[in-house]
Each structure stands twice: as structure tokens, then as C-alpha cells.
Image (cartoon, grey):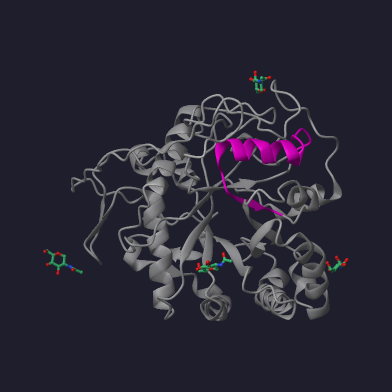
């Protein structure tokens, strides 16, 4: 994990006041039937499954409907999930990390025919992500296969007449940036330019967004003494001035998004939207993981949800509402690494919320057989074990 020192730079001179934004309505009716007046939440959620105690997808479908969450990302294309959400209107982003295989046109076609086509239109699959954080990793074969895999999957969607309904993209860590502060100086790592240029050209050609995984938690954890907690938690703070644009940033996530816009612009692209494919904050961690607390997690996700609900853009792109998939739906007990890795969930596997985000007493929804909680599903399926290798560890600093 390369934390650029610029991320932790925090000017204290400017005063920045952030007006209060009305809280979105998150509370579902107690009986699990969402009131017609409840607007869909504007944020989506990552449904990771590296666990052996998660509820059945039909129960998860009920839970998400009771919360009015209408966008979900999977780390695979789990048919049990896609089937359970048929007819719900929930929008799915699904993933395929088998890049070398997908770079072959016949395999890509077979995969789309088997994992995407049969579920449309009952289950709304709107995006396929190829690879997760591949360019900041160490797998050279995956890096080289990334664009060919995206191209082959897109071509398969075209051939099957699905490309109007389904985007193709890839999610990358903010660590693909060599510099991220001030945001106007955002630049991709030089050694990745050979991959980034053709990748951006392709995304622009498709009109697809560039997806990033961004965790201000890591910056805080690495340097709790110099990174301002209010700045990373969207709490009132003096803000950081960008001398390159004279814009002021009151939180690190928006600064990271705008750094990606600047990096893309430096490669000639002002025509690609940036979206957040993962962000979140752990509610618990090891003793040396400073900041991993229930209170900070509730503050980070709660404040972020309010901003997303208000349709707020970043300082550089004020008219483009920040688009977020929160990580994650459940605590995942089989994730490796430090304790924080297993504690990103908004919910315990039994359906109880880890902290109050305004969800109140979350309802289990009409699909649930009981109102007292979820029962555990059996052993992880092959799909889940496969995704275990795909859903990357949010590496410790
Ligand atoms: C490659 O992908 C195809 C289509 O999904 C699949 O049938 C095949 O098993 C994959 N090959 C390997 C080696 O994983
Ligand atoms: C594909 O991405 C573009 C750009 O973000 C967006 O306008 C479009 O609605 C997306 N298509 C689908 C099916 O989500
Ligand atoms: C920022 O504001 C200062 C003071 O008003 C001005 O001198 C400078 O040219 C501005 N910079 C940009 C990039 O607009
Ligand atoms: C759900 O699990 C959490 C964490 O293990 C526990 O604290 C809570 O009491 C459980 N809730 C129910 C309703 O069983």
C-alpha cells in the first residue's frame, strides 16, 4: 500500500463551513413493506460473501428491499443472488476476475451467455466489472489481460444484443495514483501509463465510468497524528485549499475523486465519469488499527450517505453527484488480514445492524420466514470460494 504523503497534507488556515444537509429517510416500515413514499436510497452497497454464516440471498433481498437499497455490487456473478433478486428492480454490478480467460473471445461469449443473459431482464444487471484493483497489484498477467478481457466481454455483450443494457468497466484502487494532493496535481503512476492510456480510451469510447476503491480510513490509520479525523469523517473542519484551482476540500474522499479526474485529464480525458466502487470504514480492528471504531464507522458512512442523498458533487465537478457503493453489507468472517477486514459490514450476518445509521430496527422483509433474525446458510459455495480469491484484501499500510 503506497500512501502518498500528499494525502495526509492538511492545511489548517482556511475556514470552511459546511451547511447541514437534511438526513435521508432510511427507516423502513416495521412490517418490512416499504412505504410507497420512501424514495430509493441513492447509494449502493457491496454484497461481499467471504463468510460461512451469511443469510440466504432471498433473505438478503428482503432486507435490502426493506431498506430501499436499489443498487448492489457482487464480487462474482453468483446465480443464487441474481435469481433471488429477480423482479426486485435492484440494479446489479457483477464481477469477473478471471482476466486471462476472459481475454479469449469464445470464453467471454460463453461467460456472458451463462452468467448475464439468462438473468435479464428480470434481474437488472447494468454493469460488468473486470478485475478488482488489478493495476495496483503485482499480477503482470492480469494487468496485461485487463483491457483485452474488457474488450472481449463488451464484444460478447454486443454480439448478444445486450450492450445497451450492460456497461463494462473495471475498479481500481486510488493507489494507481502517483500523486493525489493537491487534487489538481493528481497523476497516474508512470509505470501504469501503458495500461491506463488505452484503458481510458476504451472507457471513453464506451461511455463507461471509471470506478475507484477509496478508503480514507487507511490514510488515517497510517498517520493518526497528522491526518485530521474530522477531515476524513466528513465532519466540520477548516478544509484544505488546492492552490492549483483555488478550490477548498472539506473531506479526503472528494479530494481523491478529484485527483482521479485531474489524472485522467492529464491523459487527455475529460469525458469519463468517476464513481466509487468501494468505500467504507471498519467498526472494529486490531489494537494497532487506530480509528476502527463503531462511532467512526457510523459517522463516516452516515455523513457520506447524507451527502450522496443531497446529490452533492465534488468541488471540481459540482454538477456530477457523487456516486457510491458502500463496503460492505455484512461483516465477513472469513476475510484474511487484520481484524478490520472482517468488520466493514453495516450488518451482522444475523441481520442486526452494527450501528445506527437511521436504519432503525432493520426489517427482514417479506422474503424472510421469521422476524427474529436470519438463519445461517450452509458452507460456502464454490462461487463464494472463488470470490474469495477475487475480493481483494484491503491491504494494511
Ligand atoms: C473460462 O471461462 C469459461 C466461460 O465461463 C468457463 O466455462 C471455463 O471453465 C473457464 N476456464 C477456466 C480455465 O477457468
Ligand atoms: C453506463 O455508464 C454511463 C456513464 O456513466 C451511464 O450514463 C449509463 O447510464 C450506464 N448504463 C447503464 C446501463 O447503467
Ligand atoms: C487563486 O486565487 C489567488 C488570489 O485571489 C489568485 O492570485 C490566483 O491566480 C488564483 N489561482 C487560480 C488557479 O485561479
Ligand atoms: C446478532 O449478532 C450480533 C453480533 O454477534 C449480536 O450482538 C446480536 O445480539 C445478534 N442479534 C440477534 C437478534 O441475535
Above or below residue 241? Residue 65 is: above
* Residue 250 visible in image: yes
Q: Residue furthest front?
A: 36
Q: Residue 231's spot in the image, x, y percent?
A: 34, 43
Q: Quick check: 201 left or right of 224?
A: right
* Residue 345 visible in image: no
Q: Residue 147's spot in the image, x, y percent?
A: 65, 76
Rendered image quadrant of residue 17: top left
Q: Quick check: 370 left or right of 226?
A: right
Above or below residue 299? Residue 192 is: below
Q: Which residues are magenta?
A: 51-75
Q: Residue 329's spot in the image, x, y percent?
A: 62, 40
Q: Residue at x 67, y 78 (%)?
A: 151
Q: Residue at x 67, y 64 (%)?
A: 131
Q: Nearer the viewer, residue 79 or 295?
A: 79
Tell me, yes or no, whether the highlighted magenta stretch contains residue 59: yes
Q: Residue at x 74, y 69 (%)?
A: 99
Amino acid at each position: 500500500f503506497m500512501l502518498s504523503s500528499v494525502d495526509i497534507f492538511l492545511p489548517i488556515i482556511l475556514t470552511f463551513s459546511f451547511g447541514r444537509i437534511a438526513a435521508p429517510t432510511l427507516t423502513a416500515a416495521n412490517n418490512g413493506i416499504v412505504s410507497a413514499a420512501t424514495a430509493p436510497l441513492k447509494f449502493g452497497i457491496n454484497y461481499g460473501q467471504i463468510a460461512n454464516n451469511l443469510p440466504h440471498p432471498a433473505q438478503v433481498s428482503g432486507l435490502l428491499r426493506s431498506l430501499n437499497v436499489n443498487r448492489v455490487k457482487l464480487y462474482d456473478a453468483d446465480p443464487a443472488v441474481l435469481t433471488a433478486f429477480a423482479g426486485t428492480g435492484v440494479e446489479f454490478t457483477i464481477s469477473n476476475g478471471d482476466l486471462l480467460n476472459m481475454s479469449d473471445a469464445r470464453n467471454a461469449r460463453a461467460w456472458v451467455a451463462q452468467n448475464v443473459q439468462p438473468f435479464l431482464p428480470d434481474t437488472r444487471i447494468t454493469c460488468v466489472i473486470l478485475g478488482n484493483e488489478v493495476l495496483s497489484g503485482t499480477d503482470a498477467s492480469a494487468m496485461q489481460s485487463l483491457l483485452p478481457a474488457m474488450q472481449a466481454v463488451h464484444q460478447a455483450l454486443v454480439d448478444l444484443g445486450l450492450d445497451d443494457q450492460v456497461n463494462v468497466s473495471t475498479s481500481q484502487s486510488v493507489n494507481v495514483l502517483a500523486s493525489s494532493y493537491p487534487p489538481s496535481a493528481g497523476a497516474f503512476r508512470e509505470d501504469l501509463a501503458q495500461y491506463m492510456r488505452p484503458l481510458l480510451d476504451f472507457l471513453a469510447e464506451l461511455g463507461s465510468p471509471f470506478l475507484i476503491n477509496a478508503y480514507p480510513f487507511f490514510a488515517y490509520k497510517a498517520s493518526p497524528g497528522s491526518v485530521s479525523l474530522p477531515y476524513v469523517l466528513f465532519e466540520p473542519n477548516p478544509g484544505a485549499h488546492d492552490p492549483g484551482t483555488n478550490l477548498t476540500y472539506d473531506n479526503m474522499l472528494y479530494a481523491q475523486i478529484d485527483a482521479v479526474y485531474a489524472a485522467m485529464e492529464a491523459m487527455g480525458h475529460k469525458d469519463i465519469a468517476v464513481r466509487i466502487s468501494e468505500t467504507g470504514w471498519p467498526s472494529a480492528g486490531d489494537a494497532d488499527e487506530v480509528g476502527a471504531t463503531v462511532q467512526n464507522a457510523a459517522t463516516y458512512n452516515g455523513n457520506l450517505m447524507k451527502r450522496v442523498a443531497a446529490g452533492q458533487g465534488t468541488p471540481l465537478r459540482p454538477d456530477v453527484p457523487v456516486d457510491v457503493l458502500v463496503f460492505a453489507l455484512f461483516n465477513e468472517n472469513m476475510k484474511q488480514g487484520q481484524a478490520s477486514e472482517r468488520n466493514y459490514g453495516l450488518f451482522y450476518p444475523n441481520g442486526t445492524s452494527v450501528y445506527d445509521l437511521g436504519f432503525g430496527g432493520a426489517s427482514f422483509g417479506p422474503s424472510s420466514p421469521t422476524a427474529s433474525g436470519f438463519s445461517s446458510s450452509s458452507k460456502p459455495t464454490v462461487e463464494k470460494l472463488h470470490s474469495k480469491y477475487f475480493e481483494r484484501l484491503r491491504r494494511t499500510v
